[in-house]
Image (spheres, helix red, strand yellow):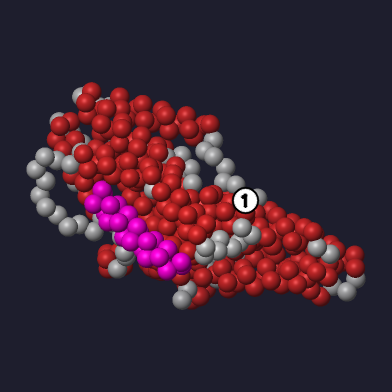
Amino acid sequence: MRPPPSPASQQMSADSVRLLLSSIRDPKIAATAGEAVRLAQAALVDLEGLDESLYHRFKDSEGELGEDTGAVITVRALLNGTFKGLRALLKFCQAMKPQEEESMSLDADFGDLEAASSKSAEDELSLGLGDIGALLDGIDEHEREPEPKRFAALQTKLSSIEYGLSSQLAELEGRVKLSLNMREVSQAIEAIDDTQGSTSQGVFAVLSAVCEAFAPGIDSASLAPGHLTTLQRALLVRRGLADLGRALAGPHERLQTEKDPAGAAQALMGVRGAIGKFVAGEAFSMMRPADRWQLAHFERSLSEQSVSAARMTSEGLSKYLESLSSINQREVLVLHDRRAAADLREAKAAAEQLAMIEPRLALESTQSALNAAMALYGHSAGLDDAILALPERLVSVERMPETFKALERIAALIP
C-alpha cells in the first residue's frame, strides 16, 4: 500500500497554504484563491486514490475483474469516485471565468510539468501530456501589478486549464460508455487509468497558477505532498524494475542450475528476498494496479513454494519482468529519453572543447552530461551496465578523461 504523506509534509503543505493566502491583501481574492487550492488538493486525493482502489479490486478478484454486470457497476463506481473532486474543481473554475471572455479553442495540455522541451515533440502529444508552461506564461509579468489585475490573469489561466480538463473528462466518459456498452471492462479501466494521470497534471497546474499569481516564491509542490508527475512516477518504476532485475538475475540463475539442495534453497532465499524487497518499496506502489497484483502474486507464490515448484515460478517472474520493459514505450518516457540523449551529447561535446583549454572550465558541462546519462538508467540492460560502470557520479578534474570515455560508450548505446 502506498504510504500517506508524512506528518511533516502535511504540515509543510498547511504552512505553504497559510503563507500563500497571507500574501493576498484583498479578502475576497484570498478566499477565492484558497478555495481553488482546497478543491485542487481534494481532487488530487481522489485521483491518486484510483491506483489503490483498482489494486484492491484486482486482489479481491484474483486478477480478473470479469465482464459481467458487477464488473460494469464497479467501473462506473470508479469513474464517479475518481473524478468527483475534479468535477467540483471544474465547476468552481467555470464560475471564476471572466465576465467577458474571448472565445477560445485551446488544447490545454499539462505534461510540461515534466519539462518536455522539444516543441515539435510536444505538439504531437494528446491532451494531458503537452505544455503547461504555455498556460502559465505571462503570469510572472503580473507579479508587481495590482492584485485585481493578477487575479484577472489567473482567471484567464484557470479558464484555459478548465477547458482542457473538461475536454479530457468528456472524452473519457464517452470512451467508458462505449466500452461498457460492449462489455469491454478492461478497456474502460485502461481509459480511466490513462486519464487519471493526465488530469492529475492539469489539477497540479491549478496549484502552480495560483502560486505564480500571488506568491511565486512558494514551491507549488509543497501544496500537494506526495504528488508525483507522470514522468516522475514512470522513472521511479523504471529504475525500480531495473534494480529488481539485477538483484534477481544471480539468485534466479543459481536456482535454475544448482543441483545441491542446500545451494538451491539458498538461491530461492535470494529470489524471495529480491522480490520481497521490491514489493515493499516505493516503486512497486507506483506501478499500474494489474502489474502490482501480478508481482504480488509471484511474491506470495514464491514464499510458499518448494524449490522444485519455485523454479518454474521464478522463470515466470523473469519473463514477466522482461515484458515490463514496454514501459519504455510510454510517450512520456520516449520524450524524456530523447531529451536526455540530446542533453548528454551536447554537454559532452561542450565539455570536451572546454577541457582542451582548461579542465576546470569543463566541470559544469561534464556534470550535466553525467546527470543526463544517469537519467537514462533502467532503459535497457546494456545501457544500465555502461551507466553503472561510470567512474564517478560527481565529476572531478582528475578522472575527467575516464569519464569522457565512459560517456562515449553510453552515447553509442543509446538507440
Residue 366 visible within the image: no
Judged by its main secondary structure, the magenta piece is helix
Residue placed furthest toward the front: 69
As helix, strand or loop, the secondary structure at mark 1 comes to: loop
Residue 173 visible within the image: yes
Q: Quadrant of residue 118?
A: bottom left
Q: Quadrant of residue 36?
A: top left
Residue 160 point in image, percent of width and height: 22, 50
Left or right of 151 in this view: 248: right
Residue 218 point in image, percent of width and height: 35, 35
Q: Nearer the viewer, residue 135 or 312?
A: 312
Residue 35 to residue 256: above or below? above
Q: Nearer the viewer, residue 9 or 36?
A: 36
- For the record, the magenta segment spans 161-184
**Amino acid type of the residue tagged 1 in the rendering:** Gly
Magenta includes 365? no
User: Which residue is pictured at 40% across the width and 39% down the height?
Assistant: 42
User: Which residue is pictured at 32% across the width and 65% down the height?
Assistant: 125
Q: Nearer the viewer, residue 297 or 156?
A: 297
Residue 366 point in image, percent of width and height: 45, 60
Total labels drawn: 1
User: Which residue is pictured at 76% across the width and 66% down the height?
Assistant: 251
Mark 1 is surrounded, within 10 Å at the Cα level, by few (under 14), some (14 to 19) or many (20 or more) other residues, namely: some
Residue 228 point in image, percent of width and height: 45, 49
**Residue under circle 1?**
281
Residue 206 to residue 385: above or below? above
User: Which residue is pictured at 58% across the width and 51% down the height?
Assistant: 56
Residue 370 to residue 31: above or below? below
